[in-house]
Amino acid sequence: MLTAALLALVDLVSTSTTYEAHGPMPRPESARLVWSEEFGERELDRRHWSFETSHNKQGWFNGERQYYSANRSENLRLSNGSLIIEARAEKLSVAAYPDWGGQSYTSARIISKQAWRYGYFEVRAKLPCARGMWPAIWMLPKNMQHWPDDGEIDIMEQVGAEPNIIYATLHSGRYNHTLGTQRGAHRPVPTSCSAFHRYQLDWRPDSITIGIDDEAVLRVVRNATDGKPEWPFDRPFQMILNLAVGGSWAGAKGIDDAAMPQRMEVDYVRVWQAAPRT
């Protein structure tokens, strides 16, 4: 739980769909670094990450229009200590890519092999802002059975239809966007596409706070009566990094093919957790 002093600094305004928070978001003093990906190798470390391609043939969710490639340097590569996920306007062929579903755009989506329950997470990234882009830093449970019942943590989403606005959102069976009850907040970040920023998650047994550059954006506190429909955030989750194209939200104002290719650059992913009690 947050200390009384820190709670006093956090100004939380809540409605049925907005859980805005303002105030400092320091990393807990007791937390120690337990996992990090600095992207300093020549290629993506496959011990840490898997490519997610499962819905290429039938098409991805939310009306998204990209094909997610696996181990294709045009869409994902490491350069100068950063991960680059690049969306391109191009068509592939079934002969070369048997799972291609006819999409006119390519990109990449990776998921961590490691899963965590609770901790302080930080991803330093620079985002694209062209129309139709949908970069995301988010988490799903390792043993996902049914969405949204099993939960989703969106640490950062930005859509080209609304450039430079960063969204933080939690989804559960009771609180999700299909019902219009998702627990979310947003914050303008005018330099999100020209500079790196640190996107952060402080996930505790009884609260979740999401922030940018040590400043809280969203905070949701678990109620004593909450069960899985309200709070499925008590099991291990995996980290996902991806750049989607189009969809009902990101493509609301169309897709700017002339602006392609577009990149999401990630400097690092770091995870801290409290030391086990002795």
Image (tube, rainbow, N blue to C red):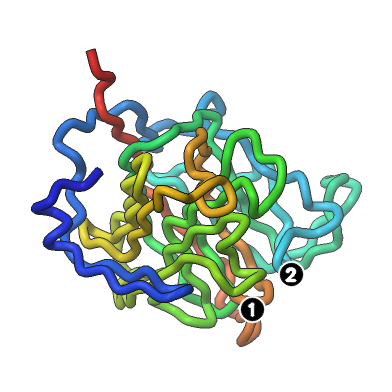
Element assignment for label 1: loop
Return the residue nearer the eye: 40 or 183: 183
Q: Quadrant of the C terminus?
A: top left
Where residue 100 sits in the image (x, y, percent)? 83, 53
Farthest left residue? 5
Residue that carries the numbered disc 2 in the rendered image: 63
Residue 20: image x %, image y %?
Answer: 33, 70
- Is 120 located above or below residue 226 in the figure? above
Q: Which mark is residue 251?
A: 1
Residue 51 in the image: x percent, y percent?
64, 40
Q: Is residue 12 above or below residue 4?
A: below
Task: Spot the residue most to the bottom.
Answer: 253
Residue type, label 1 = Gly
Q: Secondary structure at mark 2?
A: helix
Check whether the beta carbons of the residues at disc 2 and disc 1 lie within 8 A of each other: yes
Residue 52 visible, this angle: yes
Q: How many marks?
A: 2
